[in-house]
Amino acid sequence: MLTGAEIRKRFLEYFEKKGHKVVESDLLVPRNDPTLLFTGAGMNQFKEQFMGKNVTYKRACSSQKCLRTGDLENVGRTPRHHTFFEMLGNFSFGDYFKKEAIAWAWEFMTGEMGIPGERLWVSVYKDDDEAFAIWRDEIKVPERKIVKLGEHDNFWPADAPSKGPNGPCGPCSEIFYDFGENTGCGKADCGPACDCGRFIEVWNLVFTQFDRQPDGSLPPLPARNIDTGMGLERITAVMQGVRTNFDTDLFIPLRAAIRRAIGREVRDEKLIADHIRAAVFAIADGVPPSNEKQGYVIRKLIRRAYLKSGMKAPFLYNMVPGVASMFKEIYPELDEKREHISSIVLDEEKRFSDTLRCAMPVFEEMAASCKGTLGGSEIFKLVDTYGLPIDIISEEAQARGMELDTETFDVLMEKQKEQSRKGSDISTDFIFKPDKFREAPKPSLSDVLPLEARIEFILRKESPSEEAAEGERVEVITSPQSSRFYAESGGQSGDKGAIEKTDGWMRILNTYETDGRKVYEAVVERGTFFKGDAVKLCLDREKNSDTAKNHTATHLLQAALRNVLGDHVKQSGSLVTDERLRFDFTHLKKMSERELSKVEEMVNMWVEEGVPVAKEVKD
Ligand code: SER
């Protein structure tokens, strides 16, 4: 029997032999794409190459770590929903196209994997006669096993022709494994589109050939690409002859460890296995649990797994070494950081069990006296005062057949959140976005402050706009752009400030950079702003200098940690804002009180001494 690890290896070797460069998995949070919350597909890291930029090799293959959070309710309930999974893929950037992609996929399945051709069915997009003909005439798949489906199933992104997004897209062709006639619904017309479980989609071959325009037209891309994706867990299930991904060797040892730790069977064992895998990989990639963006997702996964286990004391952290060792060949970083990951998981479990200890009795009391619907202000109290996550409240309410007055709750929350809106517009979907600033110029830079500038570009509700009215949240590019505004990167938040004119002002909440353009995320506090307006750009020097100080402090902290604990201390993430800093680092044990105070003293000493900070501009 082939193991999951062997399948991954054979896939990469097969495509390497076909002239593909084996590319390492990108991090779970894409290195170069602020529009994505998590990496959700193999092609994410090749976004530029798909647009014809930076093409240094024309064929690539990878096993990509992915995280998708769209189907959270289904995880562990169905055979094949995951948050974390690995996607095997081969890619062509303006090189080979449909014919080779199809032939190699078939050869890999029937040759390398040894799956009998009779077991495989395929689907093509209804208008893609070219792909249909290749399957029928060259691969010799019987016509009745080539199913034509519409844009929802056989276009990527799904429904792109009618609904967008604009940008690269194309028809796709999927390969299905047939578990056999006697495994499904038995209907005469049962086929790959049927969801009875007889068929499982294993491989998606996307023929990226169009560049969708805002008017819905589909002109061809200058260079046609191939983007394929095959879930490692799925192909492993097929190869190991099991009906769910959770019964493959990619999960079995972990599930056994979970059962041992809990000491009995739990209904949500699969969910727990899924969530702990996701948390381990995410923390290794620099996303510890927090209240923001990606960190919030990880917090939620750890807490959900803990809650579903019914355990009264932390135990998930003990699963970390097991997960790390299952994947240490291909992802050695897990094993290297396992103590660190484990301590972060433990910390989160502790916090959460404290929260639960205080909040659950309050919740139970509210539930007992609320007559079927829990009021908005009660929910708000649970969330705000007791720190109980809303998802958990709603799951627990559902389990008791209660309704929630979420409308009132949302209003209360909204009020509360007014201050911290930043980041809320990061999307959770995983398709890549066409460049929002495609039509925006790239103005020259100036280091004068405050800066006299013109409004060059306004992005309102994700589209270019001529104006921005009071109360609206927009993204703005000015000409010239300011080199003095620090753009969000390396864990330091972007600078804040204001864009002013005689009859109005906007508050800059954040600055980020994309493709050589500084973009200000701003909210119009007064007046209306138009493209072309002459404005003054002011940097919030106080916040800027607080942020800079906190940034310097992270370096001091790192130096002190290395001094006290040793050179093995490496940064594995950080967050720097004007209010606080967080520094994640690798170390094999919990620090002792003594070590902590030594580090603290050292940092404070350097601060008090006023150790000089040198500034140098490098390219
Ligand atoms: N991008 C496609 C998918 O996610 C193929 O890799 O299915």
Image (spheres, grey):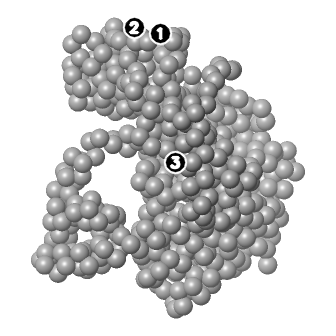
Which quadrant of the figure has residue 54?
A: top right
**Residue drawn at 65 percent across, 19 percent down:** 617
- The answer to whether one can see residue 427 in this image is yes
| Numbered circle sitting on residue 582 | 3
**Secondary structure found at label 1:** loop
The answer to which of 202 and 283 lies nearer the viewer is: 283
Q: Residues within 10 Å of mark 1 (few under 14, many from 20)?
A: few
Residue extending farthest to the bottom is 264
In the rendered image, residue 534, in percent from the top left (x then y), is placed at 34, 8
Circle 1 sits on which residue? Answer: 448
Residue 450 x, y percent position in the rendering = 40, 12
Distance in Å between CA atoms under marks 1 and 2: 8 Å
Q: Secondary structure at mark 3?
A: strand
Q: Residue at x 82, y 64 (%)?
A: 112
In the current view of this chain or complex, which residue is farthest to the right?
17
Identity, as a three-letter code, of the amino acid under mark 3: Arg
- Dot 2 falls on a residue whose secondary structure is strand
